[in-house]
Amino acid sequence: MLYLLGGTARAGKSTIARQFLTQTGIPFFCLDYLMMGLANGLPEYGVDPDDDERRVADLLWPVIEPMATAMVENEEDYLLEGVQLLPKHAWALRQKLAGQLRVCFVGFAEVDVPVKLAEIRHFGGGPDDWLKELDDQEALANIERLKDISRYVRDECLKYELKYVEISADLGQTVNLVVQYFRPGLD
């Protein structure tokens, strides 16, 4: 079974993936590494990590789709996670790999932006937390941008009938909800 976990940056995808690994033993791959490999190793491919997430997702999909298909064909249980997944791509792959793919997106379309900033400042995001380098005004603007992307992802999930989970209220509860959503594929 292949699991796709997409959504906006800072929505808890990596936390969910780690919890899923802990509970199931199923490994995960963060698509940020693929993005950085292409950006730094094949600059002619045009991947810019600072570009709009949706543009980067479209650029990476021709690589992600055959990689995901090969994982399913080789009967690998794996979770792929990243902002580089879009609902339209996940839907197309689900049509191709019917019954062998579970998909979920997470975001914070309903978040109170100052509250989200306070959470980020309090809990941090690890060594790759690019928001910690920004002053509050810049961080608030970025969180508002991510909130807009979350709305887009939520609306696209509705359009393509894919699972979307809002993380605004309680990250811990959201992590458990998404892990449990993925688990039926294991039973």
Image (spheres, rainbow, N blue to C red):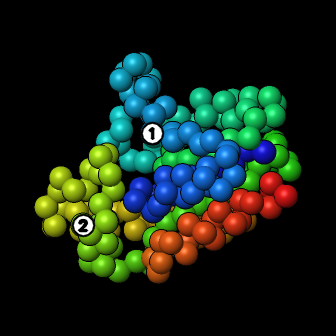
Residue with the mark numbered 2: 121
The residue nearer to you, when weighing 49 against 101, is 101
Q: Position of residue 93 (x, y in %)?
A: 73, 44
The disc at residue 32 is 1
User: Is residue 166 toward the left or the right of residue 178 in the image?
Assistant: left
The residue depicted at 45 percent of the width and 62 percent of the height is 11
The residue depicted at 36 percent of the width and 38 percent of the height is 49
Classify mark 2: helix, strand or loop: helix
The residue nearer to you, when weighing 179 against 48, is 179
Disc 1 residue type (three-letter): Asp
The residue depicted at 29 percent of the width and 46 percent of the height is 127
User: Is residue 183 toward the left or the right of residue 179 in the image?
Assistant: right
Classify mark 1: helix, strand or loop: helix
The residue nearer to you, when weighing 122 against 32, is 122
Disc 2 residue type (three-letter): Arg
Image quadrant assignment for residue 33? top left
The residue depicted at 31 percent of the width and 46 percent of the height is 128
User: Is residue 141 toward the left or the right of residue 30 in the image?
Assistant: left
Question: Can residue 154 be spotted in the picture?
Answer: no
- Work out whether 165 lies above or below 27: below
